[in-house]
Amino acid sequence: MTYLLLFVEFFKIGLFAIGGGLVTVPFLFDLSEKYTWFSAKELTDMIAVAESTPGPLGVNMAIYAGFGAGGILGAIIAVLGLVLPSVVIIIMVARLMDKYQCNTRVQVMLRGIRPSVLALILFAGLELARIAVVDVLAIVLFLSLVAAIRIWRKSPIFYLFVSAILGIVLQL
């Protein structure tokens, strides 16, 4: 039963997480409340691991959550559930885009979806901040990293590496 639930829940996430991996985070928060697969605190760890490892964020998180819920088979099933809608939709869109890309209704629909994707990403960021930024040191680190990213625009890998070192040194 767990495997079927994993497939269905991650299929729904894959179907509606328009905009990339970070958009999966609000859906995963819902899963953390609905099932005992992982807690909201574990979700922040999942995101840190998923952001720090190669591969798409959503897939990495599906692997992490699926493995926690059902081992290796659970991870495979969660990933299949997550990517199957995208594969089907991309095949359909690729076939139809040439025909309808100049259609005004399609362009308006896509412009309407963009703000909702931004809202989902912002919601995910605010939820993560609520869980991860819990003391003055974390707030200072967060604000320093935001400023550094804005000023220097280095690779995300650089900031993850610096943050990992700071976490060790500062015993976060």
Image: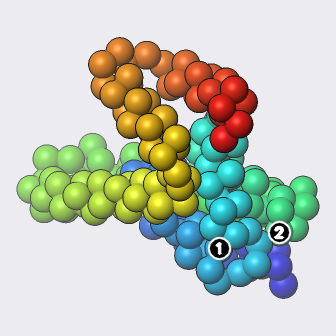
Q: Name the secondary structure under disc 1.
A: helix
Residue sitting nearer the eye, 142 or 118: 142
Q: Which of marks 1 and 2 is nearer the N terminus?
A: 1
Q: Which amino acid, mark 2?
A: Ala
Residue sitting nearer the eye, 152 or 130: 130
Q: Name above or below for residue 6 compared with residue 74.
A: below
Q: In this view, does 111 lie to the left or right of 3?
A: left
Percent across and percent down for residue 82 are 62, 60
- Identify the residue at horizontal 62%, vertical 55% (top origin): 44
Residue annotated with mark 2: 69
* On-image quarter of the N terminus: bottom right
Q: Name the secondary structure under disc 2.
A: helix
Between circles 1 and 2, the one closer to the viewer is: 1
Residue sitting nearer the eye, 161 or 137: 137
The part of the image, by quadrant, that contains residue 158 is top right
Q: Is residue 77 visible?
A: yes
Percent across and percent down for residue 157 are 57, 22
- Identify the residue at horizontal 62%, vertical 23% (top origin): 161
Q: Which amino acid, mark 1?
A: Ser
Residue annotated with mark 1: 32
* On-image quarter of the C terminus: top right
Q: Please tell me how crowded label 1 is: few (under 14), some (14-19), or many (20+) other residues with Cα within 10 Å.
A: some
